[in-house]
Image: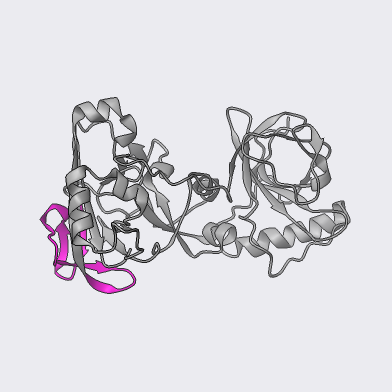
Amino acid sequence: MEARYRGTFVISWAQAFIDGTPAGPAEMPAVGAKWRWTGRVLRLDAPDAALILDRPAGEADIRGRIARAARRRFGIRVPSTEPAPVGEGAFVVSDGETEYQVLPIDTGGRKGGILAFPGALPPSDTELTVVARADQRPALSRRAGGDAGLICFTPGTLVDTPDGPRPIEHIRPGDFVLTRDSGPQPVRWVGSRRISGARLFATPELRPVRIRAGAFDTDRPVADLVVSPRHRILLRGAAARLLFNEAEVLVAAADLVNDRSVLIDHSLRETTYLHLLLDRHEIIRANGIEAESFLPDEAAIAALDPSARESLLSEVSGLAEGEDVCGGPARRCLSRPEAALLLYDGRLSA
């Protein structure tokens, strides 16, 4: 059986079907569509040498192998240099138990393109469901008082400042924190929101995420970091460059959960979420790992409690009128489907 073989595999675009119909050139399936493939598959690597996308020169490696193999097997010429970003059309299919990454590559020729499966081969002649696409982002929540946009640290988190690490609960407006891009920057506003045990029980998606010490690079964070589910962590690696043409990206903590080194924290009976707003959206260091400061977009503002929201809108002129007072995100912020593609079979640094 071909399913769950490890390696890197390639098929012709003509071997794929979307909702029972042969897939046309460059046709991308929608999330929820039924997808299957049939026929022979070409394996690009030896059984004991699975290609991992985030190895050094991983993109050139996979493109070079695909180029040579496609010419041999399908008669398709694939440029092995200066490829277009793969992530724009990448998608994930599932049989209900296992998810498989699919990387479409449009060769621009009359014979159409090819589909690469890095990491594992989905079963052939089996109806699979498209569960994610890299180019489809979730809609921004506009519900006042909603919880989807909570971007916060928790008490005890040590934030780097010019005078050394400092507990976040001791930081006040006007204090300086160290940022990755702009050096020392003053804190413009500090907010907090207490989440009671009853609220955590009734709304478990509010439970914080615990990133265990050493979850990344063996020594980062230096101590467990507990953040809100939508708080974004800075990640880097060749896989980010391959999929999104970015050296670094921001990924929500909830999208990193693996139930081992990153997990939902069920041990807390209640928690308090703390927000740090700077003049711009910045990358700061907390417990030795780089993460974002508060980004006051609509979802984040809606997630504040009424008193904190009023305080923020009063403190930051123009925010209530919808002005983009803090500029855009410091890095590209990945959606859940994009994060799934990034984390699939990839080694990343934080």
- What residue appears at the point 37 percent right and 66 percent down from the top-left corner? 327
- What residue appears at the point 51 percent right and 64 percent down from the top-left corner? 246
| Residue 158 can be seen, yes or no | no
Q: Quarter of the image containing the C terminus?
A: bottom left
Q: Is residue 250 magenta?
A: no
Q: Residue furthest front?
A: 321
- What residue appears at the point 77 percent right and 30 percent down from the top-left corner? 125
Residue 233 drawn at (x, y percent)? 37, 54
Residue 52 drawn at (x, y percent)? 59, 52
Residue 330 drawn at (x, y percent)? 39, 64
**Image: 19 above or below 297:** above
Q: Is residue 184 magenta?
A: yes
The image quadrant that residue 297 belongs to is bottom left
**Image: 347 above or below 100:** below
> With 300 as the anchor, is 140 left or right in this view?
right
What is the image's colouring?
A: one colour
Q: Which residues are magenta?
A: 157-185
> With 165 as the anchor, is 242 left or right in this view?
right
- What residue appears at the point 53 percent right and 45 percent down from the top-left corner? 337
Q: Residue furthest bottom?
A: 183
The one of 17 and 76 positioned closer to us in this rendering: 17
**Image: 192 above or below 173:** above
